[in-house]
Amino acid sequence: MPVNPVSHAPLYGDISMRSRILLMISCSIVTVLSACFLKPQYTTLEAQLEDSRLRKYQTEKRLEYLEGESSQAQRKLQLMAAELKDSEEVRNKCAEDLKELQAQYTYLKNINLQLSENIKVLRLELNKKNSVVELQEKVIQLLDDTKKTIQTSLKDQIAAQEVEVIEAENKLKVIFVDKILFDSGSAEINPKGKESLRILAKSLKEIKNQNIVIEGHTDNVSLTKYLIKRFPSNWELSTARASAVARFFEAEGGIDPLRLSARGYSFYRPVAPNDTEEGRLQNRRIEIVLGPPD
């Protein structure tokens, strides 16, 4: 017997509806049960999620802060490195300057030592020169006093132009024309000459630290045959006359012979031309030179 499809439609429809209702009820029950059982877990998870988010935020902020601090530290590090480099350059420059200053100090120290030595030498030389100057001043004063004394004691001879007293180059010269001391062609002192030399010797004797040089001079006139027998030339005549004065000073003037010396210059040191009688008269002379020891 054929089945009527329409007659079975409500049955399948009822089953389907019931299933749907049951499914919906089940879902509701599951939802309710899930809500009952899962709500605490969800709340916990949600709190954990919120805490994680907060921690993440704090971590991000901390990271941002640390990154900022790191950047700042990096900048400071770079600045310090630059400053350190500058400081190193300054230190090196200071070291070079110090080395140069030490070299300059050593150089100046050596110069100072040399200058100190030079100053010592110069002071010694200055002291010596001062001593020499003082001695020269004393000598000049002594010669000046002696000159005045001689000029006073021989004023008559000076007035007669027989004696001349000259002071030059720290020396005192007493110049006698030969006629006051010697006769023509003679090397023996005449009485008038002895009187003048005796007066002079008194003044010369008082000066202890001065040497006395007696110099004989002649004119250029040749000696006569008679004189040549005694004096081969004017050399011998000028020397003999100087020696005679030296002997007189020693024997009758009481002057220390160690202070005396005699020299003859013939006619080779004239003080006037020899072509006139007046000039030859000036050249025939005895010079008594008073001066410091050689």
Image: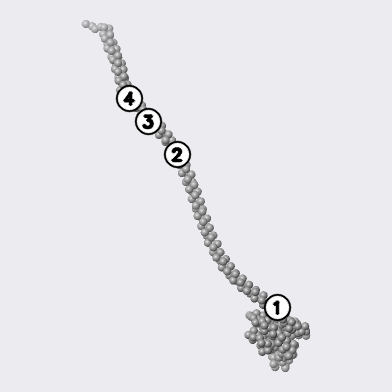
User: Which of the marked residues, 4 or 3, is nearer the chain's N terminus?
Assistant: 4
- State the image coordinates of residue 145 (x, y, percent, origin top left): 70, 79
Task: Name the foreground residue: 59 vs 257.
Answer: 257
- Which residue bears the numbered disc 1? 144
Question: Is label 1 or label 3 in front?
Answer: 1
- State how far apart marks 1 and 3 are (Cα): 128 Å
User: Which of the marked residues, 2 or 1, is nearer the chain's N terminus?
Assistant: 2
User: Which of the marked residues, 2 or 4, is nearer the chain's N terminus?
Assistant: 4
Residue 5 in sight here: no
Q: Image check: 187 left or right of 19?
A: right
Q: Residue at x 48, y 48 (%)?
A: 84
Q: Residue at x 56, y 64 (%)?
A: 112
* Amino acid at the residue labelled 4: Pro
- Which residue bears the numbered disc 3? 52
- State the image coordinates of residue 254 (x, y, percent, origin top left): 66, 87
Image quadrant where one finds the N terminus: top left
- Which residue bears the numbered disc 4? 40
User: Which of the marked residues, 2 or 3, is nearer the chain's N terminus?
Assistant: 3
Question: Is label 1 or label 4 in front?
Answer: 1
Residue 152 image-quadrant placement: bottom right
Q: Residue at x 51, y 56 (%)?
A: 98
